[in-house]
Image: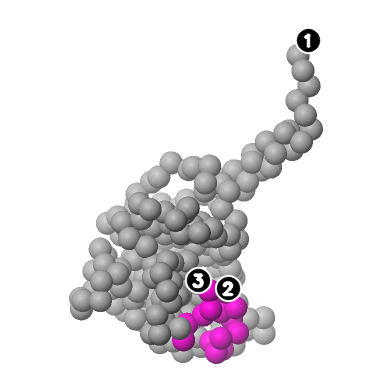
Amino acid sequence: MVAAVPAVVRAGVLTGVAALALLAAFPPGPGEQEGAGHAAHQPRTAQAAHAAHGTRTSPDAGLSLTTHAQFATPTALIPSPALTYDTTLVPAGARIEITQQSDLWGTTVRARLAGLKPSYAFGVHVHAAPCGTDPAAAGPHYRHAPDPGVSALNEVWLDFTSGPDGMATVETKHAWGFRRGEANSVVLHREQGGSGDRVACFTVPFGGSGVESAAGSSAAPEAGSAAGSGTR
Ligand SMILES: [Cu+2]
């Protein structure tokens, strides 16, 4: 006779399936094929399915962080960590999700967006500081090595072209990780290639390793109360 599967195990399996279904419900846009040079499909792993809002573990064991928000204008009654400065390209209510996965082999940053202006080529980078009412608040690009020069190898670029449906998925991987507290936002630009007006910004306190430097300490605290740290 076949032994009955314990109810606890069944519940666990169902939870896993539900998580995968949720991820699948946010389909990638065609834009992912036109993103930064490093954009590439990666097989969905169990680790991705387990990524939860704000979850992090020790850098040595790997780190996984997923956060999402709806864009709002800086003057919106209900503040959002995702700000749009140009509602023709990034309408209020458009959505963004950022996933970071870091381990000893490097860091993958993935962006999923919906509700954007369709078929538009956005420039996107990880910036140093949290977003603010002033688009300049996000500061410069996060750089791995401090040498001058803008480069997709030394910075995290997520350029993409939105699909006809206004959606996009893009991902980039580097063999290095963020320094703790020094990467705090994702900025969307009017043009690709490392320049252009800032049209939207999402405050993301990326996880990193090492001791937070004096230069980075003015940014959001690790625990993530970015919205309250003088960005309004
Ligand atoms: Cu930028």
For residue 185, side relative to residue 146 (left or right): right
Residue under pointer 2: 223
Q: 102 or 232, which lies in front? A: 102
Question: In the rendered structure, which segment of residues is drawn in magenta?
Answer: 218-232
Vertical placement of residue 124 versus 65, above or below = below
Residue under pointer 1: 1
Q: Earlier in the sequence, mark 1 or mark 2?
A: 1
Q: Position of residue 165 (x, y in %)?
A: 49, 57
Instruction: Tell me, yes or no, whether the highlighted magenta stretch contains residue 9.
Output: no
Q: How many marks?
A: 3
User: What amino acid type should be assigned to the residue bearing mark 3?
Assistant: Val
User: What amino acid type should be assigned to the residue bearing mark 1?
Assistant: Met
- Neighbor class of circle 1 (other Cα within 10 Å; few <14, some 14-19, many 20+) is few
For residue 125, side relative to residue 153 (left or right): right
User: What amino acid type should be assigned to the residue bearing mark 2?
Assistant: Ala
Q: Position of residue 229 (x, y in %)?
A: 56, 86
Q: 102 or 25, which lies in front? A: 102
Task: Identify the disc placed on residue 88.
Answer: none
